[in-house]
Amino acid sequence: MMKKKNDFTKNEQQFSDLLIKSVEEHTADPEPPHIDYSFLDEGGDKDIRVEVAAKRRLLKAVARVSVMLFVFFAGISLALITDVPGRASAWKIQVAKKLYVLKEDLRSTDSDESENYTYDNKESLLADSVEQIDRIKKEVPSLLELEYVPEGYLFGTLKIDRASYIGTYNAIYEFKGTGNDHFSVNIYYNPEGDYMTMDVDNVVEEIEREESNIYVWEDAREDSYGVTVCTEHYIIYIVGSIDSEEMVKVAENLK
Amino acid sequence: MNKMNAKEFFIKNIIVNENDFNKYIISKVYKKEIAEDILQEAYSRAWKRLDTLKDKTKAKSWMNGIIRNCIYEYWRKAVKDGRVISNIVETENGTFDLYEKVGDETDVLETIITNFETDLAYKTLMKIKEEYRVLIHMRYVECLSIKEIVEITGMKEKTITSKLSRALKKYRAMYFEAESKREGGK
């Protein structure tokens, strides 16, 4: 099976196709694994309920269909008896919508359990006003907020890309100053992360703090500088037009 | 039947698919020993969490989900454990350089593609160090984007790009070394 990837160059795509073929050929018939099944003796005499959950869901769905069909026919009959064609149409539309929702619901009861583990289960959240940050904060309680913003800068946007299965997200706060001045705070969150010991390249200053150090870095090759903070669950990058002292102040006041 | 002994259920609905699970894991990690460790861990987790399996008719796909989770954890650990301490990198001729050109892999890939041999390509992948093997697998076999690799490993994009570049160069060097040894042995 050839996988196509938009961000591949022609050579990369070709290399990928060849490599996939090679891996498929060599992993098609592996030796049986040696597994220690002694874990099955830990609590192995317990009983579990089989198929009950599926049956219960099916019964629930059948009951809901019955109620919806009853509502549908009762509504149509009532509208026809009262001889109001407009109302009959409105009923039909409403009921059709509900039936569609019900159909989707029913379909979801048959969904593959493995969907719970889909890595690609991503979503984006966007706030373009300070009030909307509060709304996002309710959905993403671990989101850090800025308690200090350098003078002359106003909030622009907050964008969050969240991988709900893994629980990680990437949040970017953008702030605008006068003219082309701007700065951004990029927060990467991982609930299982342990970034206290992460390496930071091109460090020119290290500010020691009890909870986590703040690193000021400069990249001469790319003519850029910024501030990085690594805590247990967060990696924070601050870049932009503000000077590094202001960046440090922003980093110190992220709560 | 509403009730079943958990052990019997686990054997009849999960362990019965062991060959499929093993084949799947091998195709993601290549090494038999690593695949066994992953399957062992996945079984153990599944056993402990059996109560959370809502629809017992979906046991196989539920188990596949747990296995995938274990594989992601292995990838994350493999790439993280092999990280470099500073910007100092080993160049292809064995000397050390402070920086490394990153991004343009055209030449590296072109030479491999032109001389590609399925057996040699796989053998080289098996021999290359774990961190590089996982990165090459994620990028070119799983076809994950750099952003997706960053998400799984929790490392910086720049670090991943740099490591991937080194991995490909090392892969090419090992590939041609193996090829020349084989030619020399003929």
Image: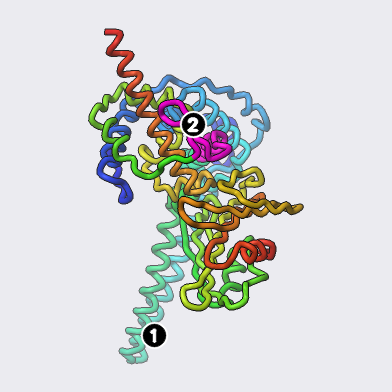
In the displayed image of the protein, which residue is found farthest to the left?
A: B114
Query: In this rendering, do the residues under marks 1 and 2 share a single chain?
Result: no
Up the image or down, B139 lies above or below B121; here it is below
Q: Quadrant of the image for the N terminus of chain A?
A: top left
Image x and y of residue B180, in percent: 30, 16
Q: Which residue is mark 1?
A: A78
* Residue A180, percent from left and from top: 46, 73
Q: Which residue is mark 2?
A: B96
Instruction: Locate residue A222 relative to residue A17 in the image: left or right.
Output: right
Q: Do we see residue A141 in this rendering?
A: no
Q: CA distance from mark 1 to mark 2?
A: 85 Å
What span is colored magenta in the figure? B72-98
Given residues A123 and A32, the one toward you in this image is A123
Residue type at the position of mark 2: Phe
Residue A201: % across, % down: 56, 46
Q: Residue at x 50, y 52 (%)?
A: A220
In the displayed structure, A142 sits above or below B144; it is: below
- Of badges 1 and 2, nearer the viewer stands 2
Tag 1 subunit: A
Q: Identify the secondary structure beneath mark 2.
A: strand
Q: Is residue B81 magenta?
A: yes
- Indicate whether residue B37 is drawn in magenta: no
The quadrant the C terminus of chain A occupies is bottom right
Q: Chain of mark 2?
A: B
Q: Residue at x 62, y 63 (%)?
A: A247
